[in-house]
Amino acid sequence: MAAEKSEDRGLVVTREFDAPRELVWEAWTQPEHVAQWWGPNGFTNTIHEMAVQPGGVWRLTMHGPDGTDYPNKIVFLEVVPPERLVYDHSDDYEDNNTHFHVTVTFEEQGSGTKLTMRMQFATAEEWKETENEFGATEGAAQTMERLRQYLATMEVKRV
């Protein structure tokens, strides 16, 4: 996996998976799947709603290993199966402090998939706060590894 800062306002994560693009897309867009791998190591998820369509909302609570709950709200802006997702991500508090824009692309690489996720914050300060408080770069690496591991179980179930 490669992760790099993007214009000091965010992060670009690239990871290749040994799984067909349609399967990676399914793991990313179906609530029963995404609940199994989303987030850094030790996190679990409760998916409250997930409408993967332009204007659709995905609300989830990430449960940290220390018992802290992190409400999240995602609003999908663009959905092009199985190629691209574009969404705005915020916490799900009334003041919506944390807010960033995400583009995820799914590219066929032979029998595998290259996934690129670009997270961009409004300001460099917001990005730095998120990186310092939550360790976003390491969290993204752990999340992509969890996805890789989960995809292997999906492949087994399909055989």
Image: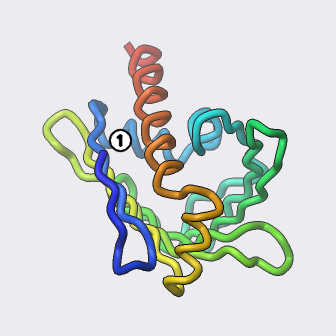
What colour scheme was applied to this rendering of the protein?
rainbow
In-image side of 11 versus 146 (left or right): left
Q: Report helix, strand or loop for mark 1.
A: helix
Amino acid type of disc 1? Glu
Q: Please tell me which residue is depicted at 56% across the width and 69% down the height of the picture.
A: 76
Q: State the residue at coordinates (46%, 36%).
A: 147
Res 120 visible: yes
Q: Which residue is mark 1?
A: 22
x, y percent for residue 40: 58, 42
Callout 1: 10 Å neighbours few (<14), some, many (20+)? some
In the rendered image, which quarter contains the N terminus?
top left
**Image coordinates for residue 135, horizontal then vertical, percent:** 56, 56
11 is higher (above) or lower (below) than 60: below
Point 48% across, 49% down: residue: 138
What residue is rendered at 49% in x and 40% in y? Answer: 142
* 107 relative position to 49: left or right: left
